[in-house]
């Protein structure tokens, strides 16, 4: 499969990536992509959460709203002026969903073409919970509920790394197991994606991080074998591969190639052109 698009691309503004839009776009052109979406971590106002939630959820790792308006948008717009004869460039953000602030997402969508939903923290009855913290059954079900609420809004085009919860999930035995609850969460995510016409992403960024051995199969912390082995039985779900590039050279790199191999082991069909 020749890559012709990538919609998951960061910039130095998030504080844990290098390069600005033009640096990524130049690599995308070199690699023959026809379309690239810039999707740095989007701003969540501090006022949307308590001080403790703010500390728990690494919010310093993203631009604020002023930086979004004054640096990020001008940077992408300049790249569009400079390179749009060579590649189609879309403006986007990867962002969390915080309930009760739908007007804020509408405001963001006035400036960008699309939003990726990245659930790095989610709603629980006790407040927001970090997805990287150990997660029991109740928390895993909260993760599913947050995704269902988010996708139902219609604000999001892709749910990125939908299987991230499995990197933190512990069954009643205190270890990772793809048990009944994990299966239930997986099926709820798939159903919500199909119902709301949102794509699910196989995230190449996870492939760069850590692999997990499973009986000779390709398996990673994410994308996780157990999750996509369920997805394969749902033919209506739209699946994309996202580079999740945090360095320019990570656009359509070896990990995206491995993501194709990963998808092929289940016979998954990959979509390459999102419609806007
Ligand atoms: Zn990131
Ligand atoms: Zn990302």
Image (cartoon, rainbow, N blue to C red):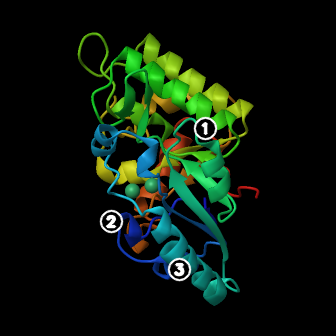
| CA separation in Å, label 2 and label 3 | 16 Å
Return the mark for residue 75. Answer: 3
Q: Is mark 2 within 8 Å of ligand 1?
A: no
State yes or no: Cβ of the residue under disc 1 lies below 8 Å from any atom of ligand 2.
Answer: no
Checking the image for residue 15, the label placed there is 2
Is label 2 in a helix, a strand or a loop?
A: loop
For marks 1 and 3, the one nearer the N-term is 3
What separation in Å lies between label 2 and label 1 (alpha carbons)? 37 Å
Query: In the image, residue 75 lies at what x, y percent?
Result: 53, 80
Q: Which residue is drawn at 40% across and 69% down?
A: 13
Local SS, label 1? loop
What is the residue that sits farthest to the right in this orientation? Answer: 275
Earlier sequence position, callout 2 versus callout 3: 2
Instruction: Pick whichever, 165 or 46, lies toward us.
Output: 46
Residue 176 found in image quarter: top left
* Residue 153, horizontal then vertical, whole percent: 68, 38
Q: Tell me the mark number nearer the camera, choosing from 1 and 3.
A: 3
Q: In this view, does 172 lie to the left or right of 160?
A: left
Q: Does residue 166 appear in the picture of this structure?
A: yes
**Most extreme residue toward the left, as rendered?**
174
Q: In which quarter of the image is residue 171?
A: top left
Percent position of residue 63, x then y: 42, 63
Question: What residue is at 42 percent from the left and 20 percent from the top?
Answer: 125
Q: Does the residue labelled 3 lie within 8 Å of ligand 1?
A: no
Image position, residue 192 (x, y; %): 65, 29
**Quadrant (top left/top right/bottom left/bottom right) for the N terminus:** bottom right
Tell me how far mark 1 sits from mark 3, CA to CA. 39 Å
Residue plotted at (49% across, 45% down): 96
- Point out the image quarter for the C terminus: bottom right
Residue, disc 1: 267
User: Which quadrant of the figure shows ligand 1?
Assistant: bottom left
């Amino acid at each position: 499969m020749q890559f012709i698009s990538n919609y998951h691309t960061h910039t130095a503004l998030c504080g844990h990536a290098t390069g600005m839009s033009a640096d990524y776009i130049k690599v995308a052109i070199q690699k023959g992509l026809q379309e690239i979406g810039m999707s740095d971590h989007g701003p969540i106002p501090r006022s949307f959460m308590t001080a403790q939630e703010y500390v728990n959820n690494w919010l310093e790792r993203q631009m604020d709203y002023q930086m979004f308006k004054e640096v990020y948008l001008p940077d992408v717009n300049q790249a569009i002026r400079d390179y749009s004869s060579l590649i189609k460039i879309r403006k986007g953000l990867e962002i969390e969903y915080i309930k009760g602030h739908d007007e804020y997402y509408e405001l963001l969508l006035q400036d960008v073409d699309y939003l990726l939903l990245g659930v790095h923290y989610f709603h629980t009855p006790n407040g927001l919970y970090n997805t990287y913290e150990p997660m029991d059954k109740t928390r895993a079900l909260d993760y599913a509920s947050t995704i269902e609420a988010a996708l139902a809004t219609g604000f999001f085009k892709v749910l990125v790394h939908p299987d991230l919860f499995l990197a933190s999930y512990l069954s009643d035995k205190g270890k990772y197991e793809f048990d009944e609850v994990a299966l239930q969460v997986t099926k709820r995510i798939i159903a919500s994606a199909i119902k709301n016409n949102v794509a699910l992403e196989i995230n190449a960024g996870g492939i760069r991080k850590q692999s997990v051995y499973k009986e000779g199969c390709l398996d990673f912390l994410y994308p996780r074998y157990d999750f996509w082995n369920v997805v394969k039985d749902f033919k209506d779900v739209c699946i994309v591969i996202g580079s999740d590039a945090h360095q320019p050279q990570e656009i359509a790199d070896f990990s995206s190639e491995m993501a194709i191999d990963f998808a092929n082991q289940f016979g998954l069909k990959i979509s390459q052109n999102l419609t806007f």
